[in-house]
Amino acid sequence: MPNAASAAPLVGYARTSTAEQEAGLEAQVRELEAAGCSEVFKERVSSVGERDQLAAGLKYLRKGDTLVVTKVDRLARSTVHLWEIVRDLDAKGVGLRVLSLGGEVVDTKSATGKLILTIFAGFAQFEREMMLERQREMMLERQREGIAKAKAEGKYLGRKPTARAKAGEAVRLHKEGKTVTEIAKELGIGRGSVYRALAPLA
């Protein structure tokens, strides 16, 4: 475990999944050390697992430091997750350097890196909106399936019209001497609905 007292400008993070070989993790460590990282946090954990060493590394970083990773998929689960990490690093005054992104080294402390950061932010927003849209579609699909099943079983009655359901109450209140406005207010329906309920009495 790195010692916080010996903070270095370049701090590396290496990760492989539990299904990958240990050699892959060590290869990342060698690449990070070759890039100038004197401290490297490393772990073998799945992309959805708890990343204790990543959390420790992020806590270890200080203003002016740079977090270095070999590839973005070693760091983040998704574009949204990557953007959240970069945003938090930026708030601390810490940069992010990716040794291979499309075959290029990307550093968020450079003008090009900042541009790529902006692009990441756009992708993150798009990904978030797509995820929400998929969730809405799944919810509507489940609702449609539920209605279809209820209809097939003869249990689906549909939504009962609120104003029509209260027609009897409207007539009763009218017979008690209440005005259309008073009836509408008490039942929470429009005056037009009250007039339609009372039409048969005219």
Image: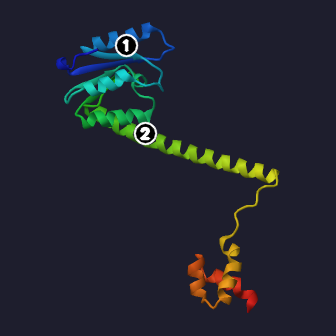
Q: How far across and how far down the image is residue 179, in percent?
A: 60, 90
Q: Nearer the viewer, residue 101 or 33?
A: 33
Asked if residue 100 shows in the view, the reply is no
Distance of mark 2 from mark 1, alpha carbons? 26 Å
For the N terminus, the quadrant is top left
Instruction: Please state the total of marks drawn on the protein image.
Output: 2
Height in image: 89 above or below 200?
Answer: above
| Residue 160 picture location, percent across and down | 70, 66
**Mark number for residue 28?**
1
Visible in this render: residue 67? yes
Q: Position of residue 182 (x, y in %)?
A: 57, 85
Q: Bin the neighbour count of mark 2 within 10 Å (Cα to Cα): few under 14, some 14-19, many 20 and up.
A: some
In the displayed structure image, the side of residue 146 where residue 77 appears, left or right = left
Question: Which residue lies under the disc numbered 2?
Answer: 124
Residue 67: which quarter of the image? Answer: top left
Whether residues under marks 2 and 1 lie with C-beta atoms below 8 angstroms apart, the answer is no
Q: Position of residue 196 (x, y in %)?
A: 69, 83
Q: Residue at 56% of width from left, 80% of height from top?
A: 185
On residue 145, the disc is none
Q: Nearer the viewer, residue 195 or 86?
A: 195
**Left or right of 23 in this view: 56:** left
What kind of residue is marked 2? Ala
Which amino acid type is shown beneath numbered disc 1? Answer: Gln
**Residue at (52%, 45%) from the top-left corner?**
132
